Each structure stands twice: as structure tokens, then as C-alpha cells.
Image (cartoon, rainbow, N blue to C red):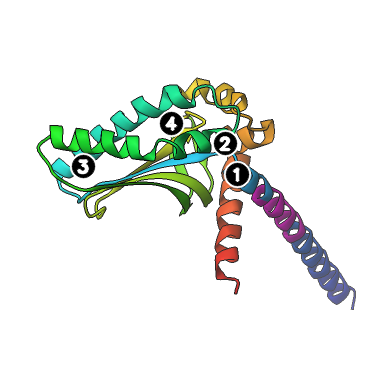
Amino acid sequence: MDGRMKTKGKLKWIEVTLLLALAVGLASGAMALQTGQELSDRVVRLHVLANSDSEEDQALKLKVRDRILAYTEPILAGSADRREAEALLRGRLLEMERIAVEEIRANGYDYRVSVRLEDASFPTREYEGFTLPAGKYLALRIVIGEGAGRNWWCVVFPPLCAAAAEEVPETALAAGLSPGQVGLITEENEGYVLKSKLVEFWRGLEAKLP
């Protein structure tokens, strides 16, 4: 009798522990998801899609990327927040298209180019010095030709693409990100990895809901 009672007691303790762990996980996931959503509302991604996966088209993609970054970085340098950055970019879409076409033709190609500013879904993506969790972000999308090749992702605002790894926190804070949001993308420890995975997991659940 005593043995059975002890076994039941152990099982109950295990059940309680698992329920507590689940509750903590759900709470952490909800908090990480909220922080991730707030983060996506403050960031503009850059998304450059190559015509194809050929070596030449991939090299061309990077040249177009460099021209676009060289053009946008000084323009967005004084932006106080994403709203201001978005307004500046929207007013220059045609100019960015012209610059991209110019670079493409200078390299001997006649691909058409589409430059758009639109919401797009991104998976979790690691960069040098920071990681952005999965989610829907406003993106400056440069589509070259068929746009069927491997693409290049980064962040045009705040200008994290151009920032050295050690400068990422300061750059992000200067653009209006909160310490919690900066911590979500730059913490290099197990807790940080867990947060990113939780955001990605919750995003997946959201996508499956009717």
C-alpha cells in the first residue's frame, strides 16, 4: 500500500512539474511573441531577389544590393522611427528602380526590375551580430528579372546591415528600439535562442489558425 501511494505521489509531482513548465513556456512564448511583434513594427527589411541561381545572376544581385544600400543609408540616417523611414523610402521607389536598372545595364544585362515596399513574411534569420525572429515585416523588395534565384535579406532600417556586430545594439537603440527588443535580437545565450524559437513556434501556430 505504502509503495503504491509513494508511486502515485511521485506521478502527481511529475504532472504538476510538467504543468508548471508548460505554463512558464506558454507565458514566455506569449511575451516573446509580443516583443517580436513590436520589433517587426519598428524595422524595415531589405529583400533582393536574383533572376536565377546562376553564378552571374547571383553576383549581379549583390551589386544591385550594394547600390541600393549606398543610396538608402544616407537618406535614412536621420530617421527617428520606422514611420519616417517608410515615408522616405516610398517617395524614392522610382529612383531606386532607376538605380537598379542602371547597375544591371552597366553589367551587360537587360532584366526588368520591380522595387516595392510591402509587408512580407520572413523566417528566423541570423546575421552577423544579431538575429531577427520569424514574422511579418515591412520590406523593401527588389525583384530582378524573374526573381527565381536565391535572395538576400537584411535590414535597411535601422541600418543594421552596415553596422559592425559590436555596433548593432547602439544602432538599434538610436532607431527607437526598446532595450527588450534589442535584447531579443542580440543576446548570445541559451535564453536568447529559446526566445527566438518560441517566437517562430507561435508564428507557426498563428498561421495555422482559421
> What is the CA distance from the residue labelled 1 to the residue labelled 3?
30 Å
Q: Quadrant of residue 184?
A: top right
Q: At 51% across and 38% down in the image, what residue appears? A: 86
Q: Are marks 2 and 1 in contact (CB under 8 Å)?
A: yes
| Relative to 191, 204 lies left or right | left
Dominant secondary structure (helix, strand or loop) of the stretch shown in magenta: helix
- The residue lying toward the viewer, choosing from 23 and 210, is 210
Q: Give the range drawn in magenta.
A: 22-33
Q: Quadrant of the N terminus?
A: bottom right
* Residue highlighted by disc 1: 41
* Residue highlighted by disc 3: 58
User: Which tag, 1 or 4, sits closer to the chain's start?
Assistant: 1
Q: Quadrant of residue 57?
A: top left
- Which SS class for mark 1? loop
Q: Are marks 4 and 3 in contact (CB under 8 Å)?
A: no
Q: Would residue 192 be seen by someone viewing this image from the given angle?
A: yes
Q: Please state which amino acid type lies under the numbered disc 2.
A: Arg
Kindly report which numbered mark, 2 or 1, lies closer to the viewer in this rendering: 2
User: Which tag, 2 or 4, sits closer to the chain's start?
Assistant: 2
- Which SS class for mark 3? helix
* Residue highlighted by disc 4: 128
Kindly report which numbered mark, 4 or 3, lies closer to the viewer in this rendering: 3
Q: Please state which amino acid type lies under the numbered disc 1.
A: Asp
Which of the numbered marks, if any, corresponds to residue 50?
Answer: none
Q: Position of residue 6 (x, y in %)?
A: 86, 69
Q: Position of residue 80 (x, y in %)?
A: 60, 27
User: Which tag, 3 or 2, sits closer to the chain's start?
Assistant: 3
> Which residue is outermost to the bottom?
1
User: Which tag, 4 or 3, sits closer to the chain's start?
Assistant: 3
Which of the numbered marks, if any, corresponds to residue 82?
Answer: 2
User: Which tag, 2 or 1, sits closer to the chain's start?
Assistant: 1
Rendered position, 138 above or below 182? below
